Image: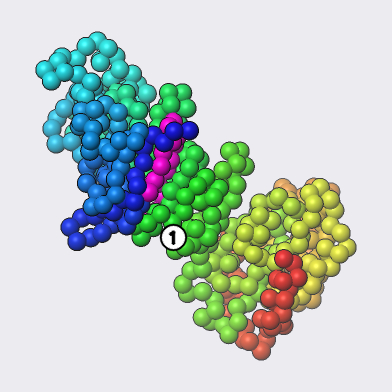
Amino acid sequence: MNVKFRSDNVCAGYREAHVLKGVSVELEESGFVGIIGPNGSGKTTLLRVMSRALPPESGLVELEGKNIYSISSREFARRVAVVPQDTFVAFDFAVMEVALMGRSPRMGRFAVETSRDIDLAMDALTRTGTQHLKDRPITALSGGERQRVMMARALAQEPEVLLLDEPTSHLDISFQYEIMDLVKNLNRERGLTVLAVLHDLNLASQYCDRLVMIGQGIVQACGTPEEVVTSDNIRRVYGAEVWVRRHPTIHRPYVISGVKPSSGKPQEKFDKAPKVHVVGGGGTAAPILAKLVRRGYEVTAGVLNDGDADQEVAEALDITHISQSIFTPITPESNQTNLDLIAQSDVVVMTDVPIGHGNIPNIEAVRNAARSGKSVIALRPDLVQNRDFTNGQGSALVSEILSLGGHSAATVDELLRLIETLTIPMTQDARPTTHDAQHQKRDDFR
């Protein structure tokens, strides 16, 4: 493919502030490239340089091999359209008038709009869902409505290259996907070359063919979404701990945030963090596992099926657990390992997992823990009959767990408060295992 638009070793900034420090980006013809990076990294500055709004201090920007400053302003405006992040308009132009402004580069100095110009402007308004606003003053619209009108103006321009600066920042979620679908369709059907600054990593991963991650004014990573959107890159550039999983339908990477340990975690109250063993399955344990890790507990998990949401979360968080193939009963070896992990724990949590004959050993293991005097918490045990598919065997086990002194929690938050209440009185001497043994166990299961 031919390179349509590119920046080459661009340095730029504002007065004494040097924002871009040698940034090179290439857009192939009909390509869709996303610029991502933390706030203040230089994303918008790069777009301003490539749109001729900010001259570079050094380096150059080329459109089909020509320096953009060697091209007339009118010619550049015919070929490159820009949708800025700031959609403020000072005058009370009607929405249709704003859309028709996109036709200006293709009209003579004193020309009047033709029927074709009007049709193209109306088509652009229709594509962006703003045709019903055509007679409204632009200043009377919401930020999201103005943003869609500015997109319509750019589309009416019939550009070869479209530059977008956070095009979804003011939009409701439904319009975010509508706008991105629209741009993607124009990219595929009409060969429109697109460069978009996006703060939403999941939108960027879903819609862009290639991504450029900028941090501290330089390119930190460049390539396909799979190559750029990784936990390591996000940790290094954003300073955030995230999970990166593969989307189950579009098979692109997607980011789940909120896994960084929070402040005020249990380690501040204990010489060693209490160990919590979670018995779950079917996605019922995932939020509990994440919240426990964030609070700094030492967490293990019971027998989980490969590909189960709980198993994926345990894998992502490096939680020691036992994996088994789906639709297979728990083996004696897996059951024994589960019992061993329970024996090393301070608190055992049983989620509101559906109970079938295949996972009855998990519930029996929790019952045995309660019999031994271990602190056990059951989530929503009063609703067990609704998820018991063992002709009452599972319900009987849960009832026995409660009769042996097991605690119950109606919500995940209540469960977490119970765990903290049960573990606060513990001391280092009361713990049944050492920190070294915990890590040895992790090594055994990796």
Identify the residue at horizontal 36%, vertical 60% (top origin). 216
Q: Position of residue 222 (x, y in %)?
A: 47, 50
Q: Where, by quadrant of the figure, is residue 445 drawn?
A: bottom right
Q: Where, by quadrant of the figure, is residue 359 drawn?
A: bottom right
Residue furthest out toward the left: 110
| Circle 1 residues within 10 Å: few <14, some 14–19, many ≥20 | some
Residue 36 located within the stretch drawn in magenta: yes
Label 1 sits on what residue type?
Val
Q: Is residue 83 visible?
A: no
Vertical placement of 183 versus 421: above or below? above
Identify the residue at horizontal 21%, vertical 11% (top origin). 114
Vertical placement of 57 versus 139: above or below? below
Residue 371 located within the stretch drawn in magenta: no
Residue furthest out toward the right: 332
Q: Locate the C terminus and report the quarter of the image it occupies.
A: bottom right
Q: Where, by quadrant of the figure, is residue 146 drawn?
A: top left
Q: Is residue 320 left or right of residue 421?
A: right
What residue sits right under mark 1 in the picture? 237
Q: Position of residue 362 (x, y in %)?
A: 79, 61
Read off the magenta span: 24-38
Identify the residue at horizontal 34%, vertical 51% (top origin). 9
Kind of element beneath mark 1: helix
Q: Position of residue 211 (x, y in %)?
A: 46, 46
Of 113 and 134, nearer the camera is: 113
Q: Main secondary structure of the magenta part?
A: strand
Vertical placement of 208 versus 100: above or below? below
